[in-house]
Image: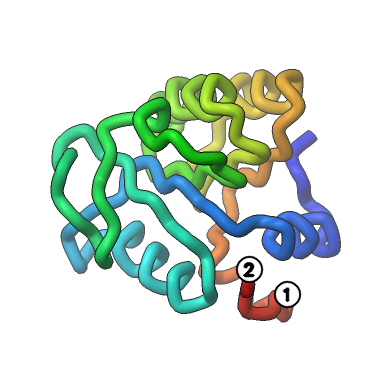
Amino acid sequence: MPLTRDEDIKALLEETRTIAMIGASDRADRPSYGVMAFLQSRGYRVIPVNPQITGEHIHGEFVYRELSQIGEPIDMVDIFRRPQAAGDAVDEAIAAGAKSVWLQIGVINEEAAARAEAAGLKVVMNHCPKIEIPRLGVAKVA
């Protein structure tokens, strides 16, 4: 079961430091652009992943084609993809050894969530950290 209790979601956000964002955009009108900036302002390291703009930079961070290229531990994979495409992103997160996956608002894929949980990852689905962090009173990460 994906995490639904406030205290579990808060604990996950407090233990997370490095977030890979699949579907990160360099367009200011896209939700992922604002969420990435917000997460950075709260002290998280956010690594953008988007095969269409590989090699570019978003908010000062190099954009990778896929998670396997990052080469450093990933605490959370934040998924900004259509529900149908979220399964591939979850499989990448499992292969990369991520500790958790966060499926954004509207991204609901029960099969992908079950695969992630079976692989030992924590799962949050149909939520946004930009909303949850202030709502739950998550302190800025150091």
Q: Quadrant of the C terminus?
A: bottom right
Front residue of 85 and 43: 43
Image coordinates of residue 67 in percent, x first then y, are 40, 32
Front residue of 106 and 91: 91
Q: How busy is the neighbourhood of tag 2: few (under 14 within 10 Å), some, or many (20 plus)?
A: some
Front residue of 141 and 36: 141
Q: Secondary structure at mark 2?
A: helix
* Res. 34 image quadrant: bottom left
Q: Amino acid at mark 1?
A: Leu
Image coordinates of residue 12 in percent, x first then y, are 73, 55
Label ID, residue 132: 2
Up the image or down, 95 lies above or below 57; here it is above
Up the image or down, 95 lies above or below 79; here it is above
User: Image check: 25 left or right of 19?
Assistant: left
Label ID, residue 136: 1
Image coordinates of residue 31 in percent, x first then y, are 33, 61
Residue at 45%, 78% in the rendered image:
41
Image coordinates of residue 6 in percent, x first then y, are 80, 63
Q: Secondary structure at mark 1?
A: helix
Mark 2 and mark 1: Cα distance apart in space: 6 Å
Up the image or down, 82 lies above or below 114; here it is below
Q: Kindly indicate whether the residue at mark 1 contacts the one at mark 2 (C-beta within 8 angstroms).
A: yes
User: Image check: 116 left or right of 53?
Assistant: right
* Res. 117 image quadrant: top right
Residue at 68%, 61% in the rendered image:
13
* Res. 69 image quadrant: top left
Q: Quadrant of the N terminus?
A: top right
Asked whether the viewer can see residue 106, the reply is no
Q: How busy is the neighbourhood of tag 1: few (under 14 within 10 Å), some, or many (20 plus)?
A: some
Asked whether the viewer can see residue 62, the reply is yes
Q: Amino acid at mark 2?
A: Glu
User: Image check: 85 left or right of 87?
Assistant: left
